[in-house]
Amino acid sequence: MPLHLLRRPRRLRRTEPVRRLVRETRLSVNDLVWPLFVHSEPRSIEVASMPGVFRLSPDDLLRACSDAARLGIPAVAIFPSVNPDLKDPLGSHALSPDNILFHAVRSVKALCPDLLVITDVALDPYTSHGHDGILAANGVAVDNDPTVEILCRLAVMLAQAGADIVAPSDMMDGRVRAVRESLDVAQSADTMILSYAVKYASALYGPFRDAVGSRIGKNTISKATYQMDPANRREAGMEAELDYNEGADIVMIKPASYYLDVIREVSDNSPIPVAAYQVSGEYSQIHAAARLGWLDLERTRDESLLAIKRAGADFILTYFAREMAESLMRRGG
């Protein structure tokens, strides 16, 4: 006996054309930022914990950026992998003219002037202890204010090298205002700030630290002393509001998939764009499960990115960017 139903939601799911017609959230190449690692070695080396991701040679970095431009990916985020011999407790190499990141930015902008280049402003790739700033004299904390002074100098140098967007990722208090003022004084007022406003002390960063060589060294300081507690949501709104008021142009939540509620809440209340970073651990988990045959790689990849977009992210940093862009191109999306 048929049911007499006024509403049958399945009517809108019956065929693929109908599903496409009423789809609420759409992912496009314009939503993607591709994080890339560069080192000064003449050949690229795959990151063991990140299948398909490489520490790129300078030449291969340029090839990757050319691919990004060809595929319509609007931006890349470039991270340096620094020779351990160049690291010290103060992260001095960050401000060296020989920093591979400065050379990489200049080369990429010369080859692909319309491709946006994002660079992190943090010291963890350069410090021998692996922290995002310099340690206090007592050795029990990262020293906030002296760290911010160095970050301001690094941000200005990156802007002068050609970075379109600088991204303070250190979670020091007050660094966005200080960086904004330093950029303006240095006549880099057009350089945008993408603030890692909500960066959690997550267990999902391990593969990234493998890629840049920033594993915590021999010290007892926890990154939880400056990155956010994963248990906290209200604090995220405060951090995002602070960074907006200090001059950030975009705020970001990191990681993404475990923090969809935070992305939604910040997005609903933010007057500026909100980004999300699908971090290395999220990427590697999907690959690991797919390699074991437990998940379909492409479907899981697509669903994970769609969920982040649906939660409210205006764009997503993801190591899947190139293959996602290629997939969208094949689909005509």
Image: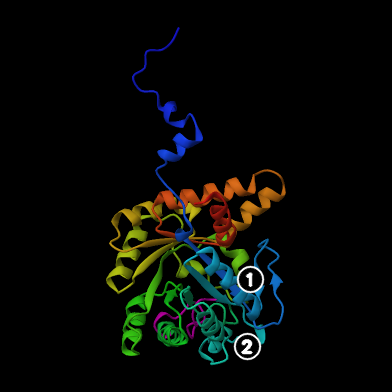
Magenta highlight range: 131-146
Q: Which amino acid does label 1 sit on?
A: Ala
Across and down, in percent, residue 214 comes to 60, 74
Magenta region's main secondary structure? loop
The residue at the point 50 percent across, 64 percent down is 72
Q: Which of 68 and 286 is in front in this view?
A: 68
Q: Using the image, determine if residue 29 lies above or below residue 293.
A: below
User: Is residue 145 magenta-colored?
Assistant: yes
Quarter of the figure with residue 195 = bottom left
Disc 1: which residue:
211
Across and down, in percent, residue 304 comes to 53, 50
User: Is residue 40 magenta-colored?
Assistant: no
Q: Which of 126 and 147 is in front in this view?
A: 126
Q: In which quarter of the image is the N terminus?
A: top left
The residue at the point 33 percent across, 72 percent down is 248
| Left or right of 174, for residue 299 | right
Neighbours of disc 2 within 10 Å: few (<14), some (14-19), many (20+): some
Mark toward the start of the polypeptide (1 vs 2): 2
Viewer can see residue 214 = no
Q: Check the image and name the residue furthest to the bottom.
A: 97
Give SS at disc 2: helix
Q: In 3D space, how far apart are the residues under numbered discs 1 and 2 (Cα atoms)?
A: 16 Å
Q: What residue type is labelled 2?
A: Leu
Between disc 1 and disc 2, the foreground one is: 1
Disc 2: which residue:
86
Across and down, in percent, residue 331 comes to 54, 49
Quarter of the figure with residue 71 = bottom right
Quarter of the figure with residue 329 = bottom right
Give SS at disc 1: helix
